[in-house]
Image (cartoon, grey):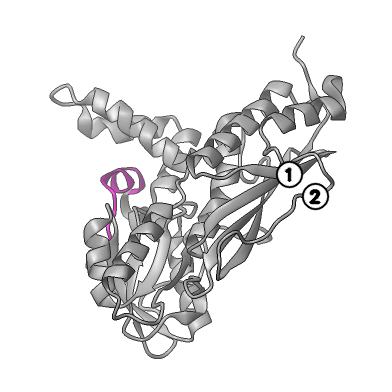
């Protein structure tokens, strides 16, 4: 008989929960404070709901846990912050299999260990729908906070990574026929094995997003080299709600416009193959790529994109409030 949360009970579930927690867990709350001088604490929170953010069809338990951690860590990276710790509360139906929630905690813990942080608390409740609520805390030097409202006219608009691949991965997971469409061009000269690896890699772009702390580390390295840049010259956010939405939000917050360098906007060949004429739409509005959209002086942007794989300068901040060629819509609206 399959063990369920009902058979385990709340105390049994908490026993599982504590296996994946920091040693500080056990009191009514976790003590918190900045551990670095002249740093500020930043906080972000996110919810994942069964049927909205994950499903058994597209995401195994370990990947649900990884995503729950990664989407919050991505917000910390977007602020330029290093993670301090996370709390996760779970709402579960009584018939939830114990193996499922154990898998979630394993994936969550794996992501936290990868980025040098830990689970410091949480809660467990009965719920009609499987729900994860995560809050992440990070630390950033008070002079190096990355925010949306500080973009300056003349800044380069920089995109890390490749956009549209999370959308491509989701489509592959939902529609098995698309796999054949992706692999068809590779069925020459015995390249099919490489194609199988490509399918798995694209699916993982959706299932296991990567917070871009590496990009922030490179920025800090370059800023030390460009010590003539006295004021912290970087603004931006992550692209979880889509590339176009991120550019629009930065411009709106900073009261500026944007010119897009359309010929410099990279589109992965897998996105072109799967999306066809909709490839650009997937790049701009696909969402959940969890990359960074950053605005900075060109003299900093150029070495940055040269040293960071798949990064590109895709536009420039201009005066006014017009954004060249972008529709003002995000990848997903919860209540529309």
Q: Is residue 287 left or right of residue 278?
A: right
Looking at the image, residue 184 lies above or below residue 68: above
Say which quarter of the image contains residue 180: top left
Task: Give residue 121's mark.
Answer: 1
Task: Choose between 28 and 206: the one closer to the eye.
Answer: 28
Neighbours of disc 1 within 10 Å: few (<14), some (14-19), many (20+) = many
| Residue hosting label 2 | 29
Magenta-drawn stretch contains 267? yes
Magenta-drawn stretch contains 17? no
The majority secondary structure of the magenta stretch comes to: helix
Task: Choose between 265 and 42: the one closer to the eye.
Answer: 42
- Residue span colored magenta: 264-275
Looking at the image, residue 242 lies above or below residue 259: above
Looking at the image, residue 254 lies above or below residue 329: below
- Point out residue 193 in the picture as x, y percentages from the top left corner: 26, 23
Q: Identify the secondary structure beneath mark 1.
A: strand
Q: For the residues labelled 2 and 1, say whether their Cβ atoms are less than 8 Å apart.
A: yes
Task: Give residue 310's mark.
Answer: none
Screen quadrant of the N terminus: top right
- The answer for how far apart the CA atoms under marks 2 and 1 are is 7 Å
Q: Is residue 56 visible?
A: no
Q: Which residue is drawn at 32% across and 29% down?
A: 197
Q: Is residue 63 left or right of residue 188?
A: right
Task: Choose between 145 and 228: the one closer to the eye.
Answer: 228
Q: Residue at x 75, y 44 (%)?
A: 122
Say which quarter of the image contains residue 100: top right
- Point out residue 312 in the picture as x, y percentages from the top left corner: 27, 62
Q: Upstream in the sequence, badge 2 or badge 1? A: 2
């Amino acid at each position: 008989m399959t063990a369920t949360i009902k058979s385990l009970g709340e105390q049994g579930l908490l026993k599982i929960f504590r296996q994946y927690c920091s040693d500080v867990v056990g009191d009514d709350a976790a003590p918190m404070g900045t551990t670095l001088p002249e740093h500020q604490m930043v906080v972000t929170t996110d919810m994942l709901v069964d049927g909205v953010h994950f499903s058994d069809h597209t995401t195994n338990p370990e990947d649900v846990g990884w995503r729950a951690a990664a989407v919050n860590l991505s917000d910390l990276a977007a602020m330029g912050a290093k993670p301090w710790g996370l709390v996760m509360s779970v709402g579960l139906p009584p018939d939830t299999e114990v193996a499922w929630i154990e898998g979630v905690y394993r994936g969550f813990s794996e992501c936290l260990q990868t980025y040098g942080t830990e689970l410091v608390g949480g809660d467990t409740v009965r719920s009609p729908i499987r729900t994860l609520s995560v809050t992440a805390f990070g630390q950033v030097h008070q002079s190096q906070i990355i925010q949306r409202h500080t973009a300056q006219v003349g800044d380069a608009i920089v995109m890390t990574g490749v956009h549209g691949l999370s959308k491509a991965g989701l489509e592959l997971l939902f529609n098995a026929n698309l796999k054949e469409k992706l692999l068809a061009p590779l069925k020459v000269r015995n390249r099919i094995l490489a194609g199988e690896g490509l399918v798995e890699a694209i699916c993982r772009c959706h299932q296991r997003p990567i917070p871009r702390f590496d990009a922030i580390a490179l920025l800090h390295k370059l800023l030390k080299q460009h010590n003539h840049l006295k004021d912290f010259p970087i603004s931006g956010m992550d692209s979880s709600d889509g590339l176009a939405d991120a550019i629009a939000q930065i411009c709106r917050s900073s009261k500026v416009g944007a010119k897009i360098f359309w010929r410099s906007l990279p589109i992965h060949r897998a996105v072109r193959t799967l999306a066809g004429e909709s490839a650009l739409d997937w790049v701009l509005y696909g969402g959940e790529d969890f990359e960074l959209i950053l605005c900075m002086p060109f003299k900093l942007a150029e070495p940055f994109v040269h040293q960071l794989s798949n990064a590109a300068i895709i536009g420039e901040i201009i005066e006014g409030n017009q954004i060249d060629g972008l529709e003002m819509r995000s990848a997903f609206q919860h209540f529309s």
